[in-house]
Image (cartoon, helix red, strand yellow):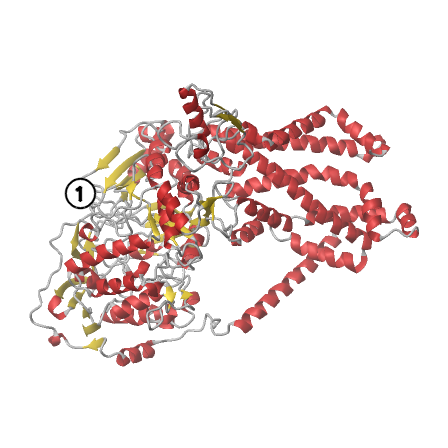
Amino acid sequence: MLKGISKLNYSNSFFLLLILLLGACNNTEDTEKNRDPTETTDNTEQVKAYYSANSTFFSFKHLADLPDDLVWEDGSKLPEFGSPKAIKGGTQYSSLQDFPRTLRHVGPDSNGSFRRWILDDVSMSVAQTHPNHSDQFYPGLATRWAVSPAHKTTYIKLNPLARWSDGKKVTADDYLFSFFFYRSTDITAPWYNNWYSTMYTNITKYDDYTISISIPNVKPDMHARTLSLSPTPQHFYKELSSDFVERYQWRFVPTTGAYKIKTSDIKKGRSITLSKVDNWWAEDLKFWRYRFNADRIQFNIIRDNAKVFESFQRGDIDQFGLNLAEYWYDKLADDHDSVAKGYIHKTTFYNQHPRPTYGLWINSSKPVLNQKNVRIGINHAANWALVIDKYFRSDYERLRSTADGYGAFTHPTLTPRKFNIDLALKHFALAGFSTRNEDGILINSEQQKLAFTVTTGYEALKDVLTILKQEAAKAGLELRIEVLDSTAAWKKAQEKKHDILFSAFGVGLEMYPRYWETYHSVNAYDQAFLTDGSTNPERKVRTQSNNLELVADPQIDIMIDQYRASSDKQKMVSLAHKLDEALFDYASFSPGFKQSYFRTGYWRWIKYPEGFSQKHGSASTQLFTYWIDPTIKKQTLDARKSGIKFKPEIKVFDQYRPKNYD
Amino acid sequence: MFNPQTQKKINRFRQIKLGYGSLIVLITLLLVSLLAELFVNNRALIVKYDGAYFLPTYTAFHPGTDFGLGYSYETNYRELKLQFSQQQNDNWVLMPLVPFSPNENHASGDQFKTTAPSFEHQHYLGTDTTSRDILARLLYGTRIALFFSLGFTLCVYIIGVSIGCMMGYFGGVFDLIFQRLIEVWSNIPFLYMVIIVFSAIPGSFDTTGRICLLLLVMVLFSWTSMTYFMRTETYKQKSRDYVAAARILGASHSRIIFHHILPNILSTLITLMPFTIVGAITAITALDFLGFGLPPPTPSLGELLKQGTANLRTAPWIIIAAFSTLIILLTLITFIGEALREAFDPKKFTAYR
């Protein structure tokens, strides 16, 4: 016994020493960043100084300065969505595969899948795109607005009732502050730095509830550009400085939306819960009043999809996405006990929405992959048709490009390269890979194998890769599959360490596709080209940007810049098509699959409004129009015990089924 | 070949029917898995084509063009067989018992999905979620697990025995320092460390490379437990007269450790061996189950167990096959271990028994 104790002390002191040593290293290395986290600062003066230093961008005027010829609109005639029958209250149970790495809205790791629950789907902007009329807007934080192409400016009357979730008023200052915030290098978010520096030219405060925002050129979707602006709580970011990333890591950013996260509800690694803002200011506002019905939404961390499904079958989770064929047809088949007894309802909803970009993102900065012929070969060696036919049971269709589903902006004729062993072999041979080794994998004259790692964070879709791997081997290409957890895979891709990434970008409802983020050279390398236009031999890969294919082509850059600057819809359409062609030629993306609907299963106590979702809805939970019926929940749980049956409900909503829509 | 003492122990082991029988079964299993390519494979055993015989099993791949087919990738021998039998000429193909490779998606219907065991389609244990043959995956997976665990045991023993014996033999400061190091090292949680270290290794290695790396990482974090036993045993033996005698005769340290002491502590070594093997099989299965082990599509027991639990209701044959294999394997090894312990137990004829 005694010996045991002394042993323990030995090892403890050893550890202590180690920790001290490590600590010491850390201290000397980086004193700037390790500012005392409890120390508070106030940047109010700094912000003021910034405004006056950039006086062309930040203007302060009076109401009398407003132009007289403005045509005000308020979107109030648009149809409301959600249902007046919605019951408020209750807790919705859901799950997350991985605990969010941060609660920040910007900066490293903030662009994960949890973002929609604290930002995209929840927070409010000046006005929002109507989910049924993508070119019209319903009011959010504004009461009315006037878009004036002549002035390249949108004038906005803010709703004086708007409050942050911490009770503070939302005023014009918070909109001005957005530009200070998103332009700050402290937030380590180059995309935002760029967007807020180049996409707007002026913001003017007329009084506390009147602002105007100007853009450099009148884009066809000027409405969306200016009305999607959202405020940033100045009082919350008073301490913004170089330690932003650590300081704000786990602080919930006050929101204008319906849900906040209490500190006590953050149980790291286990669960995180959204709860309704007390006396939410927009509770009775048209377009908002029948939504966000649940009081709390609890996300438990369940890493394994099979376990999530088991929890769902037990009723511990209310809803479960059934997009995968094996779930829709086999695991929760129509004759499944809970479905047949009517406890669980199944719904297919056809929607119209830009499609997530599932496919192989090829890192063209890596050796061998920097040869176009190899990339074309990979495109021809990827048997997506087989995956779609046999694994997805023909439920899905082939994605055409990263710009699929944008109507006229999507290239009308361009189709992705088909699986073709001969063409693949031909292109691999052009890149020097012409002999097969004893396993049938191609090698070049230096005995180098044609083998790449395919990284993915989609555990549920790893079978797709095993099928692609088998088929690619026929074309002499070896794919090595690496399945990481979703956050780790995304981190690897953001650091541009992948060879090939199997992933998808979720796409918002926008009029036209974006190219700058994913294909402009500034997002691929720091100083990709020298001043004379030649490739910079010492260029460094740019991390934390969405150019995952490391596309850097001066011609493409020029087109993207023109596309961004253009205000003529026709010109943009033709540029988009040209860009699609150029990117097709560059061959760094192997388009995978898309689906023109979403499928979901939910317990019968979850109720949806008539029509289920909206034309442009991307997921059943996106608009928060569902509600929880406590009586039915009790009734169902009792019925499950006693075996009472209800009418089974398997519904298809195809009122928005795309006809000639891609 | 053996000294009389050892011979006696071996004879004793052979008398324990359960253990001896298990050993024979396990060795047979090992041999079968070594020759797995002859039983379960999508490559033909023999192809007779245009008067020439081909034995594709262990050779480099034969492109389809070798047999008059229009493609340059690996011949699909099942189709070839069908084609030859339709042509009704002298050409023929002899396929193995189970004509599928473990990584091949072979749908008997239109879709890649789980199918129940079927003799008609020669999927004797059914298929998994992407229509891969379970028997094939099981056999190759077991082979990897078995040889992995043998390799693991060998490495752990070499390191553990050497260091443990040296600690016991030299004692003093050497012993003290190593004891503390081992205490610290063994406090690091094994599974977590393996997961962390292994996930930091880039995915650019091929499957064999990754298996070797995983072996290395696992050995790195599990050699310590062996040293405890070896240290105490050596400590005990060191004070015996025969060691002193050898020392006086001028034997070197290494000779004393490996030629004099080691044979005397062999029984501990052998008794512990089955537990190490069982531990290794369980560890690699657990890692695969958690998704941190061998990269897909490498066949493995853990991956099958995972699929099995995920499809418990829709495809129970997966879990039944994988679970039974694991149980049989571990039971066999445990029986062997039990018999070995009994055979090597020096206290057999003492009153303490």
Farthest residue in the top direction? B88
Residue B183 falls in image quadrant = bottom right
**Amino acid type assigned to the residue bearing label 1 in the image:** Asn
Instruction: Residue A598: name its quadrant.
Output: top left
Which one is nearer the viewer's eye here, B156 or A203?
A: B156
Where the C terminus of chain A falls, by quadrant?
top left
The answer to whether B326 appears left or right of A290 in the picture is right
Q: Nearer the viewer, residue A343 or B164?
A: B164
Q: Quadrant of residue A529?
A: bottom left
In which chain is the residue bearing label 1? A
Q: Is residue A286 left or right of residue A5?
A: left
In the foreground, A659 or A239: A659
**Image x and y of residue A565, in percent:** 21, 66
Q: Is residue A341 visible?
A: no
Tell me the SS state at disc 1. loop
Q: Is residue B32 above or below residue A99?
A: above
Residue at image coords 40%, 46%: A458
As drawn, which residue projects farthest toward the left?
Answer: A69
**Eyeballing the image, is B209 above or below B5?**
below
Label 1: few (<14), some (14–19) or many (≥20) C-alpha neighbours in 10 Å = few
Q: Residue at x 64, y 37 (%)?
A: B278
Q: Is residue B280 left or right of residue A464?
A: right
Q: Which residue is mark 1?
A: A660
Where's residue B256, x and y in %? 84, 49
Identify the residue at image location x=62%, y=53%.
Answer: B188
> x%, y% of residue A1?
74, 51
